[in-house]
Image (tube, rainbow, N blue to C red):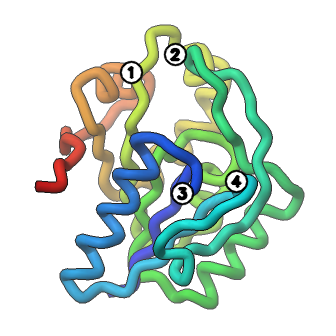
């Protein structure tokens, strides 16, 4: 199976989501799948698996959820993703933080295959979900499966966007 993993952040950017995606990539590869990671560019440095990383846009840092969050920017992002998806011929997309603008929402817009969405973040305010509800709701409805890494993540997204969510905790490399 050809799997595209779309993530707003990846190595060399540090953090939990890049680690989660890196290990997902490794484990899916061990199962015989052809996996590519679609993400943004983050300054200097590369990933240990850069040969399978497709970097589509630069980032700017914006305040979000009590920290600074790198957000991919650039005109024509959806068209660029459509072209990448057409060339790669993915069978399925796994989008991490599917409601995070602009890379993840553009990936959902561009996708023509089943999409799995994994929600990592938890927040108390839900301000973005309320303000941009109609634009985000149509994207959530495109998700074939909705995964949350914790009860807190599910409690953050579930009340705003109905449907079924499955909790699949982050793995541990033993």
Query: Where does label 2 land, which residue?
Result: 126
The answer to whether the residue labelled 4 contacts the one labelled 3, judged by CB atoms less than 8 Å apart, is no
The earlier-in-sequence mark between 4 and 3 is 3
Q: Please determine whether, in this image, residue 137 is positioned above or below residue 33.
A: above
- Where disc 3 sits, the SS reads loop
Specify whether 9 is left or right of 148: right
The answer to whether the residue labelled 3 contacts the one labelled 2, judged by CB atoms less than 8 Å apart, is no
The answer to whether the residue labelled 1 contacts the one labelled 4, judged by CB atoms less than 8 Å apart, is no
- Where disc 4 sits, the SS reads loop
Which percent across, then down, holds residue 86? 62, 86
- In three-dimensional space, the C-alpha distance between marks 2 and 1, rounded to whole angstroms, equals 7 Å
| Residue found at x 41% / y 54% | 143
The earlier-in-sequence mark between 3 and 1 is 3
Which percent across, then down, holds residue 128? 62, 22
- In three-dimensional space, the C-alpha distance between marks 3 and 1, rounded to whole angstroms, equals 26 Å
Query: Where does label 3 land, which residue?
Result: 11
Q: Residues within 10 Å of mark 4 (few under 14, many from 20)?
A: some
Specify whether 162 is left or right of 99: left
- Residue 164, by quadrant, is top left
| Residue found at x 11% / y 55% | 174
Query: Where does label 1 land, which residue?
Result: 156
- In three-dimensional space, the C-alpha distance between marks 1 and 4, rounded to whole angstroms, equals 27 Å
Q: Please determine whether, in this image, residue 52 is positioned above or below residue 160.
A: below
């Amino acid at each position: 199976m050809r799997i595209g993993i779309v993530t707003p952040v990846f190595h060399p950017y540090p953090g939990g989501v890049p680690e989660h995606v890196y290990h997902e990539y490794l484990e899916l590869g061990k199962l015989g799948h052809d996996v590519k990671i679609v993400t943004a560019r983050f300054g200097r440095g590369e990933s240990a698996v850069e040969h399978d990383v497709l970097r589509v846009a630069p980032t700017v840092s914006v305040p979000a959820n009590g920290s600074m969050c790198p957000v991919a920017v650039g005109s024509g992002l959806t068209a660029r993703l459509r072209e990448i998806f057409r060339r790669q011929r993915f069978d399925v997309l796994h989008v991490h933080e599917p409601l995070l603008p602009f890379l993840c929402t553009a990936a959902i817009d561009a996708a023509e295959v089943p999409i799995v969405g994994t929600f990592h973040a938890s927040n108390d305010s839900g301000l973005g979900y309320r303000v941009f509800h109609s634009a985000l709701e149509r994207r959530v409805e495109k998700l074939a499966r909705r995964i949350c890494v914790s009860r807190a993540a599910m409690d953050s997204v579930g009340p705003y966007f109905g449907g079924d969510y499955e909790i699949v905790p982050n793995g541990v490399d033993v």
